[in-house]
Image: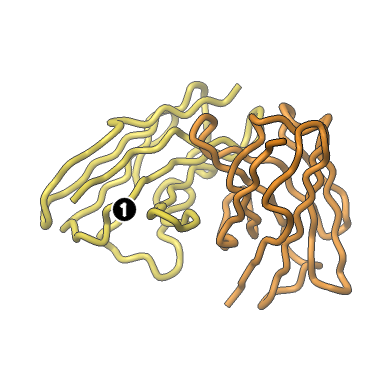
Chain colours: A orange, B yellow
Amino acid sequence: QVQLQESGPGLVKPSETLSLTCTVSGASISSDYWSWIRQSAGRGLEWIGRIYPSGSASFNPSLKSRVTMSVDTSKNQFSLKMSSVTAADTAVYYCAREGLGRFYDWGQGTLVTVSS
Amino acid sequence: ESVLTQSPGTLSLSAGETATLFCRAGQSVSSSNLAWYQQKPGQAPRLLIYAASTRATGIPDRFSGSGSGPDFTLTIGRLEPEDSAVYYCQYYGGSPPLTFGGGTKVEI
């Protein structure tokens, strides 16, 4: 059974960088694709981007300029960084295992609030 | 831009009835790339259907998907109280490459 767990600060100040990590168990981070998705009342479910086993990544064009992703195979983790955050980035952030564009397994989600 | 429009916004039905949910894509889409998810309060979405009509592992056969671009349907038969949730369609392809619909809330 694949399990994912998000971790990171729940509160980020405006203009700072949001950093989250997803720890995967039950599957190797070196296989499959791994995505970040967020959900807010205003934007609904929004795909942020994905990272491939090779470490390369692709992003939602609307967020591409502010987002980076990385993978740590030794810890079976992947990470998200989003810079220059504003209140509009307040959301529940999910990590997910992706295959052929669909999301088979999700983390429980973590609420990130952008506020001073 | 890939836009998925779901209707109705809310569906109120009784246990034992059948729910029919719709998802319309704003452009030509492949049914191979259309999925449905169920989300209950406080939980992450759960994959129900992929490739428009294939049930994900462990999903009861009360859930069925159909359709082809641009119109897709999720049908939930013999509704149970536990089916109360928000249901989302999702498309893979186009720009942005992954898009979710706005959701349909099903109340039992």
On screen, B93 above or below B108? Answer: above
Picture residue at 65% right of the left edge, 47% below the top: A112
Identify which residue, A75 or B67, lies in the foreground. A75
Q: Is residue A90 left or right of residue B82?
A: right
| Total marks in image | 1
Identify which residue, B7 or A100, lies in the foreground. B7
On screen, A6 above or below A68? Answer: below
Q: What is the secondary structure assignment of the residue under circle 1?
A: strand
Identify which residue, A41 or B84, lies in the foreground. A41
- Quadrant for residue A84, please give it: top right
On screen, B33 above or below B29? Answer: below
Q: Is residue B94 left or right of residue A40?
A: right
Picture residue at 25% right of the left edge, 60% below the top: B62
Residue B104 place in picture, x, y as percent? 33, 38
Q: Is residue A72 left or right of residue B44?
A: right
Q: Is residue A12 left or right of residue B69?
A: right
Q: Chain of mark 1?
A: B
Would you name the residue on which mark 1 appears? B64
On screen, B75 above or below A15? Answer: below
- Quadrant for residue A38, please give it: top right
* Residue type pointed to by label 1: Ser
Picture residue at 38% right of the left edge, 55% below the top: B40
Q: Quadrant of the N terminus of chain B?
A: top right
